[in-house]
Each structure stands twice: as C-alpha cells, then as structure tokens.
C-alpha cells in the first residue's frame, strides 16, 4: 500500500498539473457520479480518469464528501459513538478489487465524548483494480454513512459511475484526490516519526505513547486504534527535547483484554503516521510535570468552607447520629466527673474523627498514586470491611441492651468505644473514630463538590479539604470540649436513662441491619448468613459468664477470624450480579449506549447508586420512586439507566471519573439539549430532576 500511495501522489500531481490544459475542454465530460445531497452531506463518486485507456489495469477514484455546516462524518475508528463509512461494490462490472484509504482525522466532541472524523470536506481515495484491463467499467457503490451534529443521521445511498473506452484526465478530481491522498498517514518506514513505546498502566485505565521525530512537532494529536471494543478519551500530550519527543497519556474509557491489532496514529502539521504497536506494562514518566500544580489559595479556602459545612451536616445524617448520641449518653451517665475529664473525653473523640479522616486521605492519595480508582465510601465495597463493621455495631447494640458490659481492656470492641464512662480516653477516641467511619456511606449537601475538588487536586489540596471536613464532623465534640459547662445543663441521671439506652440500642440495631443488607449485596446471602450466625455466637459467648477467660477469648477470636475468612475467600464466588426486574422502567447501565441514544434524539437519566449508600436510598425513596418523577421516568420519553456500584465496577468508576466525581450518589441527565450531561445535586428534589429532564430533551435549532 505504501508503494502504491507514493506512486499515486506523483501520478496524480503529474496529470493534474501537466495535462490541465489538455483536459480543460473535457471538463463537462468529467467522470463523476450523480450527487446524493441533503443538509447534512453531499456525496459524489469521482474519478481521475475520464475513460478506460487500452491496457489500463487500475483507476483512481474518490468518495467526495462535503458536510453541511456543523455536521461531521467519521474516520475508520470513529470513537465511542459513530460509524465509519462503508462501501458495498456489489453489482459493479469489471471491478476486481478496491483499496480504500483514510486521510488523517480530526478530533471533535459529540454528545460529550471524544470522536474522530472529518468536517467541511474530505475525499476518501480509492484504488480500483480492473478484472479485464482496458475494458469499460460500470461502478455501483452503495454507501452507508453516519453524520452527526446535535443529532446523528444515518444515510444509505447508491452512487453509479460508468467509465467507457477513452482517454483524458479530470484535473479537478485529480487535484482533490491527490490533496487528501497526501494526508493519509504514512507507514513507519516512510515517516520521520518513530513510535517507540505503547504501554498500559497497572489498571488498564490509561495508555502511554512515546514517539520521537527528526524535526520538531507542531500541532500534534494521537489516535490509538485497538478495535471496536476499546475506546479512549482526550490525550494529555507533552513535548520535550525541543519538541522532538512526544509523551502522551490517553485515558481508557472501555477496555478488553484482547485488543485487535493495536496501532497508533499520530497526526502533525502536514504529516501523519500509523504504526503497529506492541503493548508493554511499564509506562515511562512524562518529560515534565503538568503546569497545573495546584489551585489558588482563595479557591482552596472556599472549598474548605464547603467541606466544613458538609462535615457538619453529616452529624445529623442517619449514619453518624447514633454514634454521636452514644457519646452524649455516656456523658449523661457520668455527670459527676470534672470539667477537665469531660473536656479531655470530647477532645479525644474529636481526635478520633481527625485520625480517621487523615488516614483516609493518606490511603486515597496512595491508591490514586498507584492508579487505583478512589472515591468517598468505596471501602463499603469490601466485604471484609463491611463484615467487621457489622460485628462491631452488633456488639455495641447488644451492650446497650444490657447483654453484657464492656470494660477495658477486655475486648477489641471496648477499644473502639462502647460508650461506658469507665472506658477511658481510648474509648472516647474510638467513639469519634467509629462516627467518622460510619459517615463515609452518607453524602451530605456540599460534600460531593468538596471531595471532587480535593481528589482532582494536589496532595496538599486533599489534606486541607479533608481536614476541613473532619473539623465539621468533629465540631459537636469540640463544642462541648470548649464549653464543658454545657454538660451541667443536661438532665440528671435517673431511670429515664434506661429508656435512652434502649432507644440508642435500637438505633444501632437498625444500623447493624442496614450493614447486613449491604453485606448481602457485596458478598451474597450465604456469606451474610454465616457472618450473622458467627456474630450471634460471639454475643452469646460474651454474655455467658465463663471462669476460663482463655476459652472465651478463643471463641471470640475464632468467630471474628472465621467471619473475615469467609467474607474474603468465598464472597466472589457466592455473589452474583442482581439483574433488574424485567418489568421495571430501569435499564442496565450501558455507558456506550448513552451517546447512541442521545444521537437518536432520546433523553437518558443515569442513577449511580449502591446498597451501602444511604443518601442514594433516600433519593430513590423520596424522589425517584415517587410522582411526578416516577411518572416522567416511566412515560416512554426517558431512558432510565441504573448503575449499581455496590461492588467494584471499572466501567462505573471510569464514568464517574470522566464526569469529575469521586463519590455517590451521582445522577446525570443526557439529551439532545445537553449532550455533555446535566449533573444533579447529591440531595435530589423533584423540581431539580424535572427541570434537568426538560432542558436535556429540548433539541437545539441546529439539529432541526
């Protein structure tokens, strides 16, 4: 193909320039098909030759496409949405074979997704080989073509062209075909660009490409081609060594472990190359760090204030309120203690909050550094974590119901803080720690904005934002630590304290039931049943008085270890994806299908949820499953997709990252009026959902 392409350039240019005066009188007879035309595209089949000369073995054709204003067509690798043009030559006479070439594409955005193709005008060069050299040709080209603007319109049409016996060259067609043939990417051996590295990161979330050039790069772009099942986002391109070295990191939106004949196309000013690549797993570092080293101080301070409000609101969310109440109950049962002891106890509780928040920030930074998807609350996707939390909360509830008393250092649960006044500062620390842990499956107003800003920024941004969040979450403890006299205004201890303990025990029992429900979703019903049985054995063993402490400790340790082992070892095989009800208006999440639906003029509502996300459940119960939103989602005008993130899912994680989100709930609406999507707030309201659906479904005038 490379040799033919080189000959084609010279041959077409020779005839276009050298014989223009000879062919000028024959322009009216130039070989060109009738036009297929509409507002989106005008298409013709053109030929360099006006006829078939004796002994001619091949002719040079071109599919000329002129796109209307705002309309685009697609390259051989179109991106996430789109279809490459296809030509069916069935019915042609004296045609042996064709070779279609693809000029270098341009990058454009359609429906919020990176796509590759052409705008304004393009000619796809075609080399046609004759079956009977020197004999006339009767060409029948049935073309399937997709054009997109604010909507996508498919076209199918037939172009016919007859080349009789004769001679003569059409200079205009020759010039057009030569121009676009010159834009076809060269093979590696014919280019001064060398693609030296193509490497995947550990999670297959990004591709790194390194290339060098004999002359400096200009306006450069990179287009990986890994088959129809693999799609990419917009590359981060950095040039080094006086712009002769290219380093590009391209995010992967969809991946398969068996890509088809991977290659990389690099386009530059007046040149391009397509090179096959061999994937490695050792991506080289960039030649320099990004110039975006951080956010302005004022912006960080503003977002820190938002994080503080989000943390403060978390204290009244159902995740945290039971633990905060337990701490207050412990104060009520020990109102005789000194102000200093009260102050220190609440300071240690606040320290427990900060300890978890800082530890979480450090872990998220470490995971982000090694390329793992991170987010608020994702630890609840881990069955071992959920198992331990369930057992701890169940033990706390049993303690408040009077099944047993915890005293230091009898057990690990006491170390986490059961609420006894005798437990000491370590118990106070554990209370704050537990409150912060249970805060993570909740998402309060302002919290999503703050977490997104932090995780998209520098390590300093992360620590500042998470510290502000911890300050808001710890504020009730700090308030009493600063003003310990507030304790004297609480009611004096009495029999009513028993009712308080039962009420708080009920709250914790409800929390344990919710955690068990989460465990069913994460690990499966069999593992959840096993953990429940072991927890009951643990509580009974703790409640029964035994003189031999070694036996008790052995039983307790065995229960915890067996539960952890079962959750870690068997949850993967026990759990299965929960299919949506066939009668439900919700459809399975299909990120690639979103753009297709929008291109067809449809509106798509996406709900990213999880069993462990309490805010998601509240949104569903109070807004999505109630009229008028429920009626709107079911009336046939909206495609409702549900993305269940109860268990880890790379496609959902990438979808969230693409929209700069690192936690859930996340709801977004796509449509002809909002192809890039309208993101909704964490706490939904019917008005917000309906307004977004109305806005997204309005088609712009350009698409009419």
Image (cartoon, grey):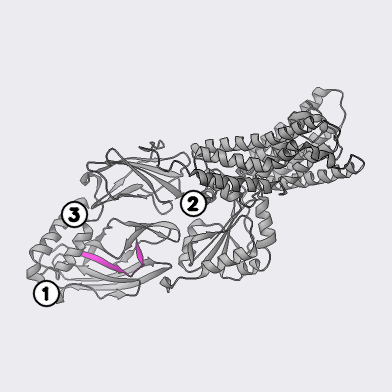
Q: Which mark is residue 183?
A: none
Question: Could you tell me if residue 382 is visible in this image?
Answer: no
Image coordinates for residue 677, horizontal then vertical, percent: 51, 60
**In the image, what residue occupies the spot 87% across and 43% down?**
491
Q: Is residue 272 magenta?
A: no
Residue 426 is drawn in which quadrant?
top right
Q: Nearer the viewer, mark 3 or mark 1?
A: 1
Tag 2 and tag 3, C-beta contact below 8 Å: no
Residue 65 is drawn in which quadrant?
bottom left
Q: CA distance from mark 3 to mark 1?
A: 27 Å
Image coordinates for residue 327, horizontal then vertical, percent: 78, 39
Question: Could you tell me if residue 263 is visible in this image?
Answer: yes
Q: Is residue 70 magenta?
A: yes
232 is higher (above) or lower (below) than 674: above
Residue farthest toward the right in the current orientation of the protein? 495
Mark 2 surroundings: few (<14), some (14-19) or many (≥20) residues within 10 A: some
Q: Nearer the viewer, mark 2 or mark 3?
A: 2
Q: CA distance from mark 1 to mark 2?
A: 55 Å
- Quickly name the residue at label 1: 26
Tag 1 and tag 2, C-beta contact below 8 Å: no
Mark 3 surroundings: few (<14), some (14-19) or many (≥20) residues within 10 A: few
Front residue of 340/590: it is: 340
Residue at disc 1, secondary structure: helix
Lower position in the chain sequence, tag 2 or tag 3: 3
Image coordinates for residue 512, horizontal then vertical, percent: 75, 44
- Tally the marks: 3
Q: CA distance from mark 2 to mark 3?
A: 42 Å
- Quickly name the residue at label 3: 4
Residue at disc 3, secondary structure: helix
Does 381 sit left or right of 562 as displayed?
left
| Residues rendered magenta in the picture | 59-73
Q: What secondary structure do most residues of the magenta stretch adopt? A: strand
């Amino acid at each position: 193909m490379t040799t033919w392409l080189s000959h084609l350039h010279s041959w077409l240019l020779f005839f276009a320039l050298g014989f223009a005066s000879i062919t000028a009188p024959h322009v009216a007879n130039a070989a060109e098909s009738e036009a297929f035309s509409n507002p989106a595209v005008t298409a013709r089949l053109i030929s360099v030759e006006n006829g078939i000369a004796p002994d001619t073995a091949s002719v040079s054709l071109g599919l000329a496409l002129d796109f209307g204003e705002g309309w685009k067509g697609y390259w051989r690798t179109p991106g996430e949405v789109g279809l490459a043009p296809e030509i069916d030559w069935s019915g042609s006479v004296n045609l042996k074979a064709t070779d279609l070439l693809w000029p270098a594409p341009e990058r454009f955005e359609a429906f919020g997704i990176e796509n590759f193709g052409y705008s304004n005008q393009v000619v796809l060069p075609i080399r046609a080989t004759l079956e009977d050299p020197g004999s006339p040709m009767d060409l029948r080209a049935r073309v399937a073509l997709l054009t997109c603007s604010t909507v996508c319109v498919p076209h199918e049409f037939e172009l016919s062209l007859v080349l009789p016996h004769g001679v003569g060259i059409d200079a205009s067609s020759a010039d057009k075909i030569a121009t676009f043939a010159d834009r076809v990417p060269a093979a590696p051996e014919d280019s001064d660009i060398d693609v030296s590295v193509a490497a995947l990161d550990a999670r297959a979330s990004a591709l790194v490409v390194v290339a060098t050039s004999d002359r400096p790069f200009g306006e450069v772009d990179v287009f990986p081609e890994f088959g129809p099942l693999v799609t990419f986002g917009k590359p981060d391109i950095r040039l080094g060594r006086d712009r002769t070295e290219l380093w590009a990191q391209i995010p992967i939106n969809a991946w398969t472990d068996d890509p088809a004949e991977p290659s990389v196309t690099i386009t530059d000013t007046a040149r391009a190359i397509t090179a096959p690549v061999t994937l490695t797993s050792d991506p080289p570092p960039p030649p320099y760090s990004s110039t975006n080293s951080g956010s302005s101080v004022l912006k960080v301070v503003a977002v820190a204030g938002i994080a503080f409000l989000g943390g403060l609101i978390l204290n009244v969310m159902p995740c945290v309120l039971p633990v905060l109440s337990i701490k207050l109950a412990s104060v009520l049962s020990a109102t005789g203690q000194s102000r200093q002891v009260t102050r220190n106890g609440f300071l240690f509780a606040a320290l427990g909050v900060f300890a978890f928040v800082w530890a979480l920030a450090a872990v998220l930074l470490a995971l982000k550094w090694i390329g793992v998807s991170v987010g608020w609350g994702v630890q609840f996707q881990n069955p071992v974590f959920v198992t331990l939390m369930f057992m701890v909360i169940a033990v706390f509830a049993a303690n408040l119901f009077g099944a047993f008393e915890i005293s230091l250092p009898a057990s690990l649960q006491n170390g986490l803080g059961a609420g006894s006044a005798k437990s000491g500062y370590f118990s106070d620390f554990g209370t704050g720690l537990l409150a912060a842990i249970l805060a993570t499956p909740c998402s309060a107003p302002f919290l999503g904005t703050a977490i997104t800003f932090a995780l998209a920024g520098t390590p300093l941004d992360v620590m500042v934002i998470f510290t502000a969040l911890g300050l808001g979450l710890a504020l009730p403890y700090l308030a009493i630590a600063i003003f310990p006299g507030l304790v004297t205004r609480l009611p004096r201890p009495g029999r009513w304290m028993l009712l308080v303990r039962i009420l708080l025990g009920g709250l914790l029992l409800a929390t344990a039931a919710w955690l068990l429900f989460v465990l069913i979703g994460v690990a499966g019903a069999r593992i959840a049943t096993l953990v429940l049985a072991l927890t009951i054995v643990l509580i009974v063993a703790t409640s029964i008085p035994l003189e031999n402490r070694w036996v008790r400790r052995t039983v307790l340790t065995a229960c915890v270890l067996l539960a952890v082992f079962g959750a870690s070892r068997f949850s993967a095989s026990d759990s299965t994806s929960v299919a949506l009800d066939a009668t439900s208006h919700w459809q399975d999440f299909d990120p690639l299908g979103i753009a297709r639906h929008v291109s067809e003029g449809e509106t798509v509502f996406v709900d990213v949820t999880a069993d462990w996300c309490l805010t998601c459940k509240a949104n569903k119960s109070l807004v999505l499953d109630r009229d008028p939103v429920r009626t709107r989602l079911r009336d046939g005008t909206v495609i409702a997709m549900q993305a269940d993130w109860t268990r880890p899912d790379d496609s959902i994680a990438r979808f969230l990252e693409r929209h700069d989100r690192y936690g859930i709930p996340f709801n977004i609406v796509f449509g002809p009026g909002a192809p890039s999507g309208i993101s909704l707030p964490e706490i939904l309201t019917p008005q917000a959902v309906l307004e977004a659906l109305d806005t997204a479904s309005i088609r712009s005038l350009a698409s009419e």
